[in-house]
Amino acid sequence: MANVLGINSVYHESAAALLVDGALVAAVEEERFNRIKHGKQADFDNPHQLPERAIRFCLKQAGLTADDIDHVAYSFDPKLRQTRYRADWWDPRLEETFRLRLGQVRGAVEELLGRSLGQRLHFVSHHLAHAASAYFPSGFDRAAVLTVDGIGETAGTSLAKAVGSRIQFVETFEHPHSIGFVWEVFSDYLGFSHYDASKVMGLAAYGDPEVFRQQFHSILRADEVNYGVAPEILGVSPERYARMEAIFGPPREADAEILPRHADMAAALQEATDAAVIALVRRIKRRVPLENLCLAGGVALNCVTNELVKQSGEFANLFIPSAPHDAGTAIGAAFFVHAAKQKTPPQRGYATPYLGPAFKSREILAAVKSAGLSGRQSKSPAREAANMIADGKIVAWFQGRMEFGPRALGNRSLLADPRRPDMRDILNQKVKHREDFRPFAPSVLAEHADKWFDVGERSPSHEFMLFACRVKSDRRDLIPAVVHKDGSARVQIVSRKSNPRFHELISCFFAKTGVPIVVNTSFNDSEPIVCTPTDAIVTFRKSGIDALFMDDVVLRAKAEEARTHSRPIRGLSRPAARPARHDRQLEPARDRTRPVSPSPRRN
C-alpha cells in the first residue's frame, strides 16, 4: 500500500489531497481552515507557505501520521521554470525571489512532516497536475486533455493525450499566450480584483460584445491555425495601462459606478474567450482524435464557454472536475506520482466533490452551546427545510463532507425559493452583500432537469455546476430568481446517488410546490465557504439567514428578523415583478457612460 500526499501552494488556491493505495480519500482547500480567501495571496514570495491545516486534515481523515506518507507530490516543477523562463517577461528581481522560495519548499515539507524525504518528494509540472486532476477522475480510458489557465511554470495553455495511466503533452503555448491572464488583467481594469473573473462573467450578460469586438479580437487571436495573446497587454511595460486606456477608456475605480461600457467590455471578453477556447478544442481534436475530452485550469470554471464546448460536438464526452482551478492540482499531482511509482493503477472515475471534513452531532451541539445558542433536533430536516424555503425563507444547509472546489454543491449551501422574483436581490443585498448583477444557480432534481433546462448530452460534470444551460422558455417566468439576463442558468443537477439528503430536500420542495428546483449559493458572506459548525454559526448570526440546518440540528433566527422575507408564494402562476433596479440600469443604452449599477459592492 502506498500513501501519496498531494500539495498545491504555488500562486493561490492552496490545497492538499491524499491517495491511499491509489484511492482518493480526502481533498480540501486551505482557505476553508485559515479563513483567508484563496488560502493566501498570489505572490512571488510565498510558494513555500504550505497548506498546513489542509495537510493535517487529510492525514486525520485517513487515520495516518506523517510517518505513513510514502510520497509527496508538489504541483510545480522549479527546474522546468528555470529552463523555460525568459528574462523579459517580468522583473528579474521578483523571479529571483520566487526561485529562492521554491528552493525552500523541500525544507518546509520536511519540517512539517518531521523527516527527510529524499527521493520521495516529487515536483510535478503544474499543467501535468492539472491534466491528471481531470483525467483520472473522469473514468475515461483515453482522452484528449486541454488545460487553460493563467500560467503554470511558463505555459498558459497545454494540449495533452492521456491513455491508460500515461499523460503526454502534444503542444504547449507559453507566456504571454494566456487566456487566464487576460481575465486577470481585465478583472482588475474593471475595478474588481484579479481573482474576480466570476464577477466579470456575470456582468458580461448585460453588455453588447459588438462595442469592443474588434479590440478584443486584436488582443486574443484564435482561429483554426493561429492562437495567441497580444504581449503588449500582458507585459510588464509601464505603458501597458496607457495602451489599454487609449482603447477602452479609463479603468473603473473599485467603488465607482458600473457603466454600460464596462458591461460591453466584459461581454466582448467573454465572446473572445468562447472563440479562443473553441479554436483550441478543434485544434486538440485534430492532434488527439479521440471521443473524450477533459478540461482543466481556471478557465474551465467559465460555465458559458464550457456549454459551448459541449454543444460544439467536437467530442462525444466531456468531463471537468469540481476543482479545475489550482486547488485541483493537489489531486492531480498525487495521481500522477502514484501512476508513475506504483504497479497498481490509480483509482479511476471517482469524481465526488465531497472530500472535505464532516462533523458528528456531538461536535455540532458543542459548537451551538459554545455560541450561547439553543438548537433543536428535527425529525425530518430535509422536509422542514423545504417547507421553510417554500414559505420564502432563506435556509443554510450544512451537511456531510464539505465540497472540494469553488462551488457549494449542497453540503455547504444557502438555499432559497427560485419562484420569487425578488429573491436574487434579497440574497445579494441582505445575505451575500455583493454586487446586484450577480446571478444565482439552480439545483435541480436529475430526473426533472430536461423539462426545465436545455441540458443536452449529460456529463458527470453537470453535478458540479459547470455549465450555463438555457432555461426552457416556457419555464422562465416560474423560476425568475435563477434565470440570468441572457436566459441561461448555471445548473447543478442533483442525483439521489451522489447526494441523497440534498436530493431529498429538493424532492420535498417539489412535492409542495411543483418546482423541482431550489436556489443554491455558497454558504458564506464575503469570506471562504464555511467549513466547521462554528464557521456556520458565525455566518448565520451576521447574515440575513432565517434558519441553519446542521445535520439534524436546527437553529432559527429571531422571529422579527425572519419575517423580513417570509411571505409565502401561493402557486406557480404569480406574475413576474418589475425588473429590479439593477436590471433596468443594465439594459443596453446609447449612452455608454450611463451608470449600470447603483451600488457596486466588493466581496
Image: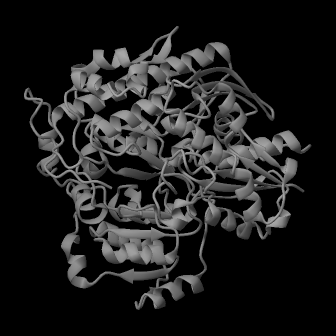
Task: Examine the rendering and report whether any part of residue 546 can be seen.
Answer: no
Question: Who is closer to the viewer here, 493 or 53?
Answer: 53
Question: Who is closer to the viewer here, 257 or 571?
Answer: 257
* Residue 135 location, quadrant: top right
Q: Residue at x 55, y 49 (%)?
A: 45
Q: Is residue 166 left or right of residue 411?
A: right
* Residue 392 location, quadrant: bottom left
* Horizontal and vertical percent position of residue 595: 11, 40
Residue farthest toward the right in the current orientation of the protein: 343
Q: How is the image coloured?
A: one colour
Q: Residue at x 45, y 45 (%)?
A: 449
Residue 545 against residue 450 in the figure, above or below: below
Residue farthest toward the front in the current orientation of the protein: 93
- Image quarter where the N terminus lies is bottom right
- Number of numbered tags placed on the structure image: 0
* Horizontal and vertical percent position of residue 195: 41, 45
Residue 581 against residue 232 in the figure, above or below: below
Task: Examine the rendering and report whether any part of residue 28 can be seen.
Answer: yes
Q: Is residue 569 left or right of residue 68?
A: left
Q: Is residue 415 left or right of residue 532?
A: left
Q: Residue at x 53, y 39 (%)?
A: 94
Question: Who is closer to the viewer here, 170 or 241?
Answer: 241
Residue 99 against residue 106 in the figure, above or below: above
* Horizontal and vertical percent position of residue 348: 75, 44
* Horizontal and vertical percent position of residue 406: 49, 52
Q: Is residue 272 left or right of residue 189?
A: right
- Image quarter where the C terminus lies is bottom left
